[in-house]
Amino acid sequence: MKKHDPLENIIGRVEDLDKVSLGNLVSRLARERKLLGTVFNSLREGVMVIDANGILLYANSASANLLGFDADETGSASLWKLVPDLARTLRFTRAGQLTGESGISREITLSYPEVRAVRLYMIPFEEEVSGVSVARFAVIVADITQEKSRNRQEIESERIASILQLAAGVAHELGNPLNSLTIHLQVMLRTVQKLDQDSTVAKLQKSLGVCANEVERLDGIITHFLQAVRPTPPDLSDVDLVRLLEESLEFLGPELKAAGLTVEVSVDTGIPVVSGDRNQIKQVYYNIIKKRTSGHERQWSDQSQCHCRR
């Protein structure tokens, strides 16, 4: 059963109203209009009403801010002139009028007042004007710029995760042949050491040593890579930072010497023992020191002070 609006019944008998009732009716209409205006202006989405020629009949505050036009232009300006990006996505007749489609949904990139992505819904309806039914269109515009950005970030994160997972699988598979190479190189080195020493054997022994070192270096790279893409919780224990620094410099000594670097460590007295992961702190030292040594193709010497302060 259709419900009848009491206000509609009163408006239908407006000619029969006295001045007091008419005043009350006008006041009530003003309150209703103000309430609806407050509701629509509180929405985050832009809400507009246009006619078939695109003339803007109503626009809430969000639509004016979102699309970059002055709300005072309502009633005279064409929405297509105010926002040309919208006109290019909608269907018009030869007369420049909108077709009476059942509804339109579009995602549009606007260039004014700033570059942003919006989702547009347009639904046709009819309004009776002076006893004649005329076409109207309700247009709702929602800002989806952040949503699109989040989607792109999620897709990029998934892509990176897939690449890292693939790379981790490849790195893990590389570990098996490297282990095999290490074993065979050790066998070859022991065999060479048993031979009579001459210049040829010495060169062969040196070459095998270089190969063993390179295999060990590759194994270290793979280990560090897997630790980076598959991080584990820190194994906390009491750590002497100075001692760890000395161990790191001792391990990287040959590399520092090859780069022509001399490192002097100067520390304050009373460096406290801290709680940390020994291996991860060592990795931090390695990264800092190796960054200093990388890219030095020319021979030069440098004195660096590594300070550890409380």
Image (cartoon, grey):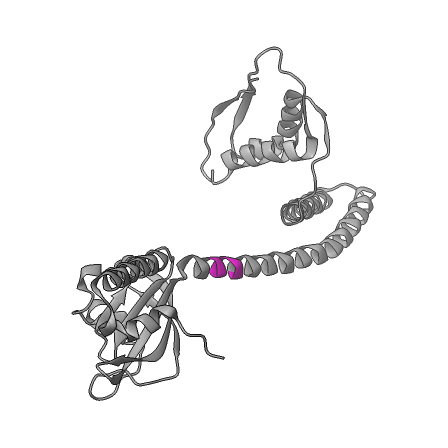
Classify residue 136 as left or right of residue 252: left
Q: Total marks drawn?
A: 0
Q: Tell me what residue is drawn at x 34 percent, y 57 percent.
A: 35
Q: Which residues are magenta?
A: 150-155
Relative to 89, say whether 197 is above or below. Answer: above
Classify residue 15 as left or right of residue 221: left
Residue 113 appears at what percent x and percent y? 25, 58
Query: What is the magenta segment's predominant secondary structure?
Result: helix
Nearest the viewer among 56 and 196 is 56
Q: What is the residue that sits farthest to the top in this orientation?
A: 269
Nearest the viewer among 200 and 148 is 148
Residue 86 appears at what percent x and percent y? 29, 72
Q: Tell me what residue is drawn at x 64 percent, y 16 percent.
A: 272
Relative to 90, say whether 186 is above or below. Answer: above
Give residue 118's quadrant in the image: bottom left
Q: Is residue 69 magenta?
A: no
Q: What is the residue that sits farthest to the left in this orientation?
A: 76
Residue 262: in sight, yes or no?
Answer: yes
Give residue 231's quadrant in the image: top right
Relative to 128, say whether 169 is above or below. Answer: above
Q: Tell me what residue is drawn at x 23 percent, y 70 percent.
A: 56
Classify residue 229 as left or right of residue 298: right
Residue 70: in sight, yes or no?
Answer: no
Nearest the viewer among 138 and 141 is 138
Q: Tell me what residue is drawn at x 24 percent, y 60 percent.
A: 20
Q: What is the residue that sits farthest to the bottom in this orientation?
A: 94
Residue 293 appears at what percent x and percent y? 51, 35
Residue 121 appears at what percent x and percent y? 38, 72
State which quarter of the image contains the C terminus. Answer: top right
